[in-house]
């Protein structure tokens, strides 16, 4: 019987050595500590370090490894991309939706422009995504429309060669640092809900844009909401696809988003599980060291198994994407799996630390510090911080309920 061969090609392994060497220098040991970025959350120092790191990454040829070279990428294949994702996460580099300043550009907007953008858009926008020159955020959700995205009401009225945007977006990741937003706006209020929506690129420095930060319960600051008051956006160069025809573009982007990057998640969440296991070695549960408690051991094993599943799905998705296939509704299964697994790991950490975890300042829960009324996320132990922070993962990119509906309808063909 033949098994599957999950080994990488020699070229991919050569690339692994190359990127590892660069990461050893560019992500020093102290920045790999779980608390490093949490302690600096919302600070200028954090922003500046991450900005410089993105530029350095681009200059060294490690940004957009699988994007065409003509747009600033490296033109590498999907195996090299997989190795890249693994190594970035292994080095605890500041990537992903929370720390990665270029994440929304590289993970979401880039692939969408590669498929739907004009040549001019690809030439001008893609290299600036990779170099970190333009930091992008995603303006889909509104106060009255999240799950029901097609109900969005931010309007863009045509006035000669500009679209005049008015309305509000909310729950915007990276809003504090973004220079520009890819947004969905309603260009034809009379049309059926899914028609008359346009995928629009908005420069957030234009007059009439106001950005307000939203603080999350973990204490994190990078979220925000934006108000548009008659913002004049030139049509030329800023509409992706055609006016009134943005729904297909949005659907494609959402599928890319839900698939995210299961390979780097596999490594990153694996670190989080390792942290939880470390805590279990120093904590008692029902008179036993937590690591010997049968229920805890079962939950650890379950998380590990789900992570392996995530890895295999990641390889599968990467292969299919490289063959030009659209993941469509299948991405919803991945989204459910990664959000559920990450939450299970965080919940396990919280259960191991118990009530003490709420007072803990140290990752292993050995030292306890009573939280004062004025203390914030910066003083919480990182397991505790994570427990609060990852709650939103069930919601971001479409809630678990919505993913289940998509799976039931589009994959299982269940009756409605
Ligand atoms: C960490 C995080 C980051 C985010 N980043 C961004 C971002 O960068 N850009 C952006 O545009 N948005 C972002 N969002 C917003 C996110 O996309 C929305 O919060 C999400 O789509 C849910 O919409 P809502 O908050 O309006 O909730 P609602 O749609 O009001 O849903 C409320 C509850 O009702 C349930 N529900 C709603 N409709 C149905 C249905 N038909 N069937 C069954 N259950 C249903 C939902 O599952 C949920 O439990 C982010 C959210 C989080 C938490």
Image (cartoon, helix red, strand yellow):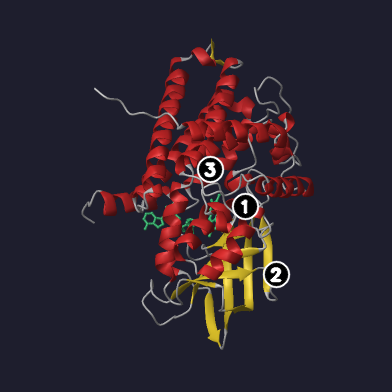
Residue at 43 percent of width and 22 percent of height? 301
Q: Which residue is mark 2?
A: 205
What is the number of the mark on residue 391? 3
Q: CA distance from mark 1 to mark 2?
A: 18 Å
Q: Residue 328 at x, y = what percent?
A: 35, 54
In-image side of 239 versus 358 (left or right): left
User: Does residue 398 show up?
Assistant: no
Q: Residue at x 47, y 69 (%)?
A: 152
Residue in the foreground of this view, choosing between 58 and 209: 58
* Element on which disc 1 rests: loop
Tell which tag, 1 or 3, sits nearer the viewer.
1
**Relative to 84, residue 327 above or below:** below
Depth check, mark 1 against mark 2: the one in front is 1
Q: Is residue 60 above or below residue 247?
A: above
Q: Earlier in the sequence, mark 1 or mark 2?
A: 1
CA separation, marks 2 and 3?
Answer: 31 Å
Q: Quadrant of the C terminus?
A: bottom left
Q: Is residue 96 above or below residue 307?
A: below
The residue depicted at 69 percent of the width and 39 percent of the height is 38
Q: Residue 325 at what x, y percent from top left?
A: 35, 52
Mark 3, secondary structure of its residue: helix
- Nearer the observer: mark 2 or 3; the answer is 2
Q: Quick one: label 1 or label 3, which is nearer the N terminus?
A: 1
Disc 2 is placed on an element classified as: loop
Disc 1 marks which residue?
Answer: 102
Q: Position of residue 202 (x, y in %)?
A: 60, 70
Q: Alpha-carbon neighbours of circle 3 within 10 Å: few (<14), some, or many (≥20)?
A: some
């Amino acid at each position: 019987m033949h098994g599957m061969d999950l080994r990488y090609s020699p070229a991919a392994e050569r690339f692994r050595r190359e990127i590892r060497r660069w990461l050893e220098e560019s992500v020093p040991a102290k920045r790999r500590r779980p608390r490093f970025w949490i302690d600096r959350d919302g600070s200028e120092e954090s922003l500046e370090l991450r900005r410089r790191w993105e530029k350095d990454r681009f200059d060294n040829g490690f940004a957009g490894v699988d994007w065409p070279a003509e747009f600033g990428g490296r033109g590498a294949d999907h195996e090299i991309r997989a190795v890249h994702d693994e190594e970035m996460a292994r080095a605890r580099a500041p990537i992903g939706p929370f720390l990665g300043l270029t994440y929304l550009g590289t993970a979401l907007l880039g692939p969408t422009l590669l498929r739907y953008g004009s040549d001019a858009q690809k030439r001008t926008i893609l290299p600036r995504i990779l170099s970190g020159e333009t930091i992008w955020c995603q303006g889909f959700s509104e106060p009255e429309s999240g799950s029901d995205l097609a109900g969005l009401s931010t309007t863009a009225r045509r006035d000669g060669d500009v679209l005049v945007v008015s309305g509000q977006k909310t729950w915007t990741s990276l809003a504090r640092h973004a220079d520009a937003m890819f947004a969905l706006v309603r260009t034809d209020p009379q049309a059926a809900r899914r028609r008359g929506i346009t995928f629009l690129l908005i420069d957030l420095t234009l007059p009439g844009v106001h950005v307000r930060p939203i603080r999350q319960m973990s204490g994190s600051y990078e979220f925000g909401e934006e108000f548009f008051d008659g913002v004049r956006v030139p049509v030329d160069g800023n509409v992706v696809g055609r006016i009134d025809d943005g729904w297909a573009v949005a659907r494609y982007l959402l599928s890319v988003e839900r698939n995210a990057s299961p390979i780097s998640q596999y490594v990153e969440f694996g670190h989080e599980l390792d942290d939880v296991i470390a805590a279990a070695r120093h904590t008692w549960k029902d008179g036993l060291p937590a690591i010997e408690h049968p229920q805890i051991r079962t939950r650890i094993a379950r998380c590990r198994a789900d992570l392996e599943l995530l890895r295999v799905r990641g390889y599968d998705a990467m292969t299919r994407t490289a063959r030009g296939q659209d993941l469509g509704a299948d991405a919803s299964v991945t989204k459910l799996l990664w959000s559920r697994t990450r939450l299970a790991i965080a919940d396990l950490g919280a259960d191991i630390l118990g009530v003490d975890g709420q007072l803990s300042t140290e990752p292993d829960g050995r030292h306890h510090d009573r939280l004062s009324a004025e203390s914030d996320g910066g003083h919480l132990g990182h397991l505790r911080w994570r427990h609060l922070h990852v709650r939103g993962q069930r919601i971001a990119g479409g809630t678990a309920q919505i993913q289940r509906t998509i799976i039931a309808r589009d994959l299982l063909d269940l009756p409605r």
